[in-house]
């Protein structure tokens, strides 16, 4: 059954419209940012772990024509909504959602992809739990953030990328379960001079380059509006270029 929806939200300056559940987790800036960091190209095979209503996958599809994005989610209602959103945006041939468990993928997805990305549940503390079961399921990782990241890297083809957006205070935990080589980290600063609350982490599978901490992106001006650099990503569908190294 399709979740009750509260209408459709515009992303990427209105390039796509995404209907979202009335209750539970709703995609926003995090989805757009992680999608912008996926270095997909026309013809790329892409996997999203935890596709939700399809916002991030559709952002990738809007930016990179000709790639194919498969997604998986445990919530069958969100899977149906993601496929409906793909149809609404004319992207059914590019974006396909499947019901299934990230830790036990459907047989059709047990293969390697050029790029894998995720906006995983990354709230581990009980004090951050949501009173809405749907929202809690999308946000609470039950101590399995490491398993989530390992599952994504396992499905990444050699030379391909695995990209995740995380809470900044969980970066150390994430790095502890990933290979030492080929990692880039991009902080997202709320405003200049403030601590980063989110980071985008990208691993190039099989690369040996040392960890790179990038200069990051400031999201808001002092008046609260988006910076010109953030606007390029959020409203103009611009990419976030993170990695210089690619393995052929």
Image (cartoon, helix red, strand yellow):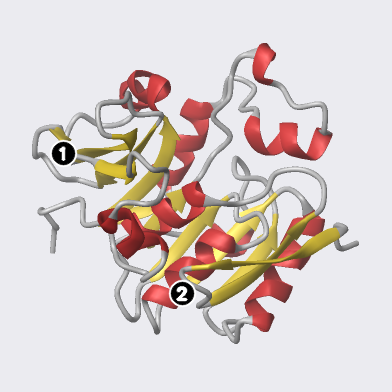
Q: Residue at x 8, y 39 (%)?
A: 209
SS under mark 1: loop
Say whether residue 158 is visible. no
Q: Name the residue under label 2.
A: 61
Residue 215's disc is: 1
Say whether residue 163 is visible. yes
Q: In which quarter of the image is residue 211?
A: top left
Is residue 69 toward the left or the right of residue 21 in the image? left
Q: Quadrant of the C terminus?
A: bottom left
Q: Quadrant of residue 64?
A: bottom left
Is residue 5 toward the left or the right of residue 146 in the image? right
Is residue 58 toward the left or the right of residue 236 in the image? right
Q: Position of residue 205 (x, y in %)?
A: 25, 47
Q: Which of 33 and 172 is in front in this view?
A: 33
Q: Position of residue 65 (x, y in %)?
A: 39, 83
Q: Nearer the viewer, residue 150 or 78?
A: 78
SS under mark 2: helix
Q: Position of residue 4 (x, y in %)?
A: 88, 58
Classify mark 2: residues with Cα within 10 Å, few (<14), some (14-19) or many (20+): many
Contact between labelled residues 2 and 1, with CB atoms less than 8 Å apart: no
Q: Which residue lies furthest to the front in this view?
A: 223
Q: Residue at x 28, y 42 (%)?
A: 218
Q: Nearer the viewer, residue 154 or 183?
A: 183
Q: In which quarter of the image is the N terminus?
A: bottom right
Q: Which residue is drawn at 54% across and 39% down?
A: 120
Q: How far apart are marks 1 and 2 (CA)?
A: 27 Å
Q: Which residue is drawn at 25% across and 26% down?
A: 193
Along the polypeptide, which appears first: circle 1 or circle 2?
2
């Amino acid at each position: 059954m399709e979740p009750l929806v509260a209408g459709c939200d515009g992303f990427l300056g209105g390039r796509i419209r995404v209907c979202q559940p009335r209750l539970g987790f709703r995609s926003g800036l995090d989805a757009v940012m992680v999608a912008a960091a996926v270095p997909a190209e026309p013809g790329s095979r892409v996997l999203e772990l935890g596709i939700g209503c399809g916002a991030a996958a559709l952002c990738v599809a809007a930016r990179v024509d000709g790639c194919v994005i498969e997604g998986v989610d445990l919530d069958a209602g969100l899977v149906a909504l993601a496929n409906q959103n793909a149809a609404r945006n004319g992207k059914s041939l590019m974006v396909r959602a499947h019901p299934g468990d990230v830790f036990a993928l459907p047989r059709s997805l047990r293969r390697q992809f050029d790029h894998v990305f995720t906006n995983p549940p990354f709230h581990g503390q009980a004090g951050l739990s949501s009173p809405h079961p749907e929202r809690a399921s999308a946000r609470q990782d039950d101590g399995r953030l490491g398993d989530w990241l390992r599952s994504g890297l396992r499905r990444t083809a050699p030379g391909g990328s695995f990209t995740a957006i995380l809470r900044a205070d969980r970066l150390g935990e994430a790095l502890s379960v990933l290979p030492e080589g080929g990692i880039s980290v991009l902080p997202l600063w709320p405003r200049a001079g403030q601590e980063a609350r989110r980071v985008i982490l990208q691993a190039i599978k099989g690369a040996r380059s040392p960890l790179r901490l990038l200069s990051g992106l400031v999201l808001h001006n002092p008046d609260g509006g988006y910076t010109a650099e953030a606007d390029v990503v959020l409203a103009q569908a611009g990419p976030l270029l993170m990695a210089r190294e690619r393995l052929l």
